[in-house]
Amino acid sequence: MIEPGGGIEGELLSTTGRPSRRWRWRAGLSGFVLLFLYATAALAPWIAPYQPGEQFRRSPNAPPMRLHVAAPSAWLAQGVLFVHPQRMVDSLRRRYEIDTTARVPLRFFARGHLLATADPKEHFFVLGSDALGRDLFSRLVYGARISLSVGVVGVLISLGVGTLVGVVAGYVGGRTDDVLMRLCEVMMALPAFYFLLALAAVIPPGLSSAQTFALIVVLMSFIRWAGFARVIRGMAASIRELEYVQAAQALGAGRARTIVRHVVPATLGYTIVAATLAIPGFILGESALSLLGLGIQEPSTSWGSLLKDANNLANLDKYPWILAPGVCIAVTTMAFNFLGDQLRDRLDPRAETRS
Amino acid sequence: MTAVTQAPSGAEPLLAVRDLVVEFETPRGTVRAVDGVSLTLAHGATLGLVGESGCGKSVTSLAIMRLLDSNARIRAGSIRFEGHDVLDLDERAMRRLRGARMAMIFQEPSTSLNPVFTVGAQVAEALRIHRRLSRAAAWAGAVELMRLVEIPDAERRASAYPHELSGGMKQRVMIAMAISCEPALLVADEPTTALDVTIQAQILDLLRGLKERLGMSLLLITHDLGVVAAEADEVVIMYAGRIVERAPSRALFAAPAHPYTQALLASLPRLERREARLTPIPGRVPDLLELPSGCRFRDRCPRASERCSREDPALAEIAPARAVACFHPLVEEGRP
């Protein structure tokens, strides 16, 4: 789950098993899905009908409500969509009954949300609610902000550090290379997940959720940069021998200029692909930590912390909708992987001619 | 080897290499790739450095530029360039010389340009390194330089990427980069080897023209005696890390003194001699780790005697400006 880049290198360096053209639609779809997810996360306060911490104490563990389309004649008076209200009939077993005679009309752009009940006293749960009566859909949308940004920020940090260390080690070589690479090996020899657990366990409890978030990202990046650094170091060492790098030196270009102008751009193809393929690892890592209660704490949510409710079979059996964050994680992970695969093919200089 | 004196005038030559020794640390042992090489290059002159692959000619040129790999060590000798002791300069001072006063072009134009930038940007970068020019001024300068190296339609070509240009055009771009700061010395390491024969002639013409126009000196490294015959004022022949013969170009081609030079000339195709076969040199270059005793060429030499396996012939002057390292030279002393 939290292998520091190990799997990625292997995948990147193999050129066999190039997906054929018929798989290309997956990359397009993935790009679209990711765009949609990130837009959702960005617009969370508008898209989510409720605040993530807002409780409806009379409706704990409510099942998802079906959205109904009203008859066109009622559109102007009542709105296009409505739900039937649910009433708890057994508070011990959390059984609900749907009252099909009554309607809760929904309005677009009501009270600054994309979709909300026309009457502020009513409520609707598209994906059901949790044990405290909080809207799962709203929590999912707000959780996306953390889960989706953890990957991007984490990759930026770890690839940034990895590129810096790798390029310097590969280009400068000699003793510098030795020291930096031994450091990388020490990092990679650490049992990453346990190390992460240990580090996460010492996060002081009083931190704000933004600080916790930042700490988690930094910790995960700290574990992963070494894998990137090793690959980039190898690339930089071979780029250093390229004639255009020698030509730059013969023109009097200094180390910094040569690295920035000639070495780093040559590693970008790898970096872009590695970044795309590494993002899911961060999302999964954060989910795993949050699932274990070491990551994002209440009242903030992330997909991993939302999944915490789904970690026993009895709950899962009674309220299967609490798996929704897991579906989101799976979809995002797959989308990034498909996109990364396609990018790798596109950026591979050995790629066959494309039509 | 120090017996040779050859400053053409009283003034200090542009470049003077004395008894240069370069060694490489390899897993198999220490390889002495350049062993006591001395050469001088006068202002505005062209020196041809000729030899087979691995004879040390490129290592010599890289040592002059101080661009040797980290596993190379300059063990002995001195390199003087424009009054500087090149081997004593620190890296910062060296960077100010490289590109500005001494520049280099390489064998393979297609790999000597960075594929991700336009050629104009790369020529402009060469200008920006040494002259603090604005982006626009550097670009204008780059186009001007590309015109100087006779690239047709230079404005448009400046925004082309290297893969969009032919090999000859790329080599012209490399030359434009190298002459951007009007260096005093241009080191051309096999500048035409990777090009078609017709393009070779054009590039050599261009180099000759630029040399005269900018008053540069040219160190022309090649294994192609034909190129040297046309371009060089003086020729230095290297074999297995040593200089075996040094002579003015005309004299060398009229009458080679060293058996190796003669063998090289005999292996060249000639239009006037309609022989079916060329004469190859028998045997192969000795392994620098297991050099034979005495003369390094003796195993392949038709004139080798018993003395050649006992003693190592030193480079000795046989005529003015002419030296050979052989006990049995083809040209006798005093008879150029």
Image (tube, coloured by chain):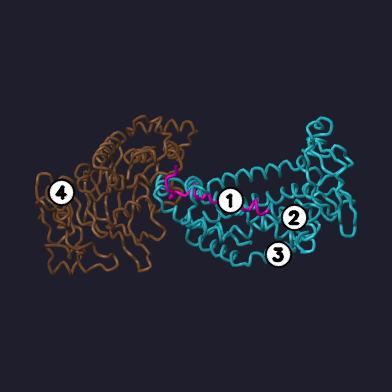
Chain colours: A cyan, B brown
Residue type of the residue flagged with mark 2: Thr
- State how far apart marks 4 and 1 are (Cα): 57 Å
Secondary element at image label 1: helix
- Residue in front for this viewpoint, B323 or A18: A18
Q: Is residue B44 above or below residue B295?
A: above
| Chain for numbered disc 1 | A
Residue placed under numbered mark 1 in the picture: A276
> Where residue B203 sits in the image (x, y, percent)?
28, 39
Residue placed under numbered mark 4 in the picture: B269
Q: Are marks 4 and 3 in contact (CB under 8 Å)?
A: no
| Chain for numbered disc 4 | B
- State how far apart marks 2 and 4 are (Cα): 77 Å
Tag 1 or tag 2, which sits nearer the N-term? 2
- Residue in front for this viewpoint, A264 or B103: A264
Q: Are marks 3 and 2 in contact (CB under 8 Å)?
A: no
Residue placed under numbered mark 2 in the picture: A212
- Residue in front for this viewpoint, A347 or A260: A347
On-image quarter of the N terminus of chain A = bottom right
Tag 3 or tag 1, which sits nearer the N-term? 3
* Image mark for residue A197: 3
Give the main secondary structure of the magenta stretch.
Answer: helix
